Amino acid sequence: MGHQNHTFSSDFLLLGLFSSSPTSVVFFLVLFVIFIMSVTENTLMILLIRSDSRLHTPMYFLLSHLSLMDILHVSNIVPKMVTNFLSGSRTISFAGCGFQVFLSLTLLGGECLLLAAMSCDRYVAICHPLRYPILMKEYASALMAGGSWLIGVFNSTVHTAYALQFPFCGSRAIDHFFCEVPAMLKLSCADTTRYERGVCVSAVIFLLIPFSLISASYGQIILTVLQMKSSEARKKSFSTCSFHMIVVTMYYGPFIFTYMRPKSYHTPGQDKFLAIFYTILTPTLNPFIYSFRNKDVLAAMKNMKIPECVFYFYV
């Protein structure tokens, strides 16, 4: 009878990640700690960039927008997971689900473009240092950041409106931990083939092209690094590039695998596992990889009188 009730309701059910087993409780606590770390790290990064004049550069301006996107992204997903787990209720309203889809697609798409913009910034800074002050003026970085947000919002508006207009005739139980388009399409009783083709086109624009641009940028950076005379500089640059590419691959790889497959190839367990990477893990890793290992940022942390235990954790 309960199943029939939610079938005819406008609400959805999020089946989530957790069951009532002791293992799930441990996993829930770990995930909650990661969420707190992510929000704290990214908030600290924004405050450091705004307060320290040494960080008023195009690179850190773009990083501040990346941190804001990451805060909004994890806050769009994890609090609802926590609420559902603690309350035992798994429902989410149609409007709530629509908002979650819209904000998620906005931030995911915007971050894809922003990461590509950041790689271009690093390419110009390392491969063409004399032209960097000319090419990367304040308006250029503002255009990159603003363009990432606006294009992300436009793409998300189109996809959210299109995805939510499909009829959901049977079960409204979404086998995922948040409202994600591929998981929702499985519930539709209409033919979604044309829309899936549109998703693939968007995936090429927001995933394959930016990822190719990032790979090409770091490829050129590595070639430039190889020409450096200082072995210490080469070692440091290789280390930085390696960490950046690992995080980028962790973000784009699962994202591409999820959004560029037909819905018939999707399995709930696989989709949930992959989504953890680009929704929860990379927002936590980004501040550490891109910022907290940088001497200027560590100096800014000292100036802000960040507690020593926090400072030495990142050193």
Image (cartoon, helix red, strand yellow):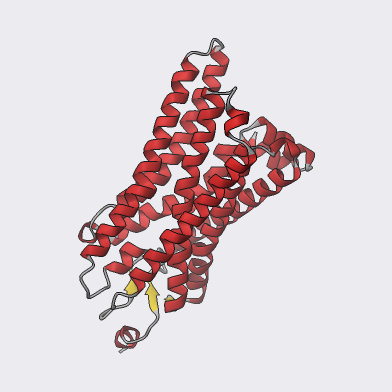
Query: x and y percent of residue 146 in the render?
Result: 55, 51
In the displayed structure, does residue 57 sit left or right of residue 252?
Answer: right
80 is higher (above) or lower (below) than 171: above
Who's the residue at 54% across and 48% down the image? 284
Q: Residue furthest top?
A: 229
Who's the residue at 36% across and 42% down the image? 209
Q: Is residue 202 visible?
A: yes
Nearest to the observer: residue 251 or residue 131? 131
162 is higher (above) or lower (below) than 110: below
Query: x and y percent of residue 113 in the render?
Result: 46, 46
162 is higher (above) or lower (below) than 278: below
Which corner quadrant holds the N terminus?
bottom left
Who's the residue at 50% across and 50% down the image? 148
Query: x and y percent of residue 155 in the render?
Result: 41, 59
Q: Is residue 23 visible?
A: no
Looking at the image, how many numbered discs can be counted on the residues?
A: 0
Who's the residue at 66% across and 37% down the image? 57
Query: x and y percent of residue 154 in the render?
Result: 45, 60
Which corner quadrant holds the C terminus?
top right
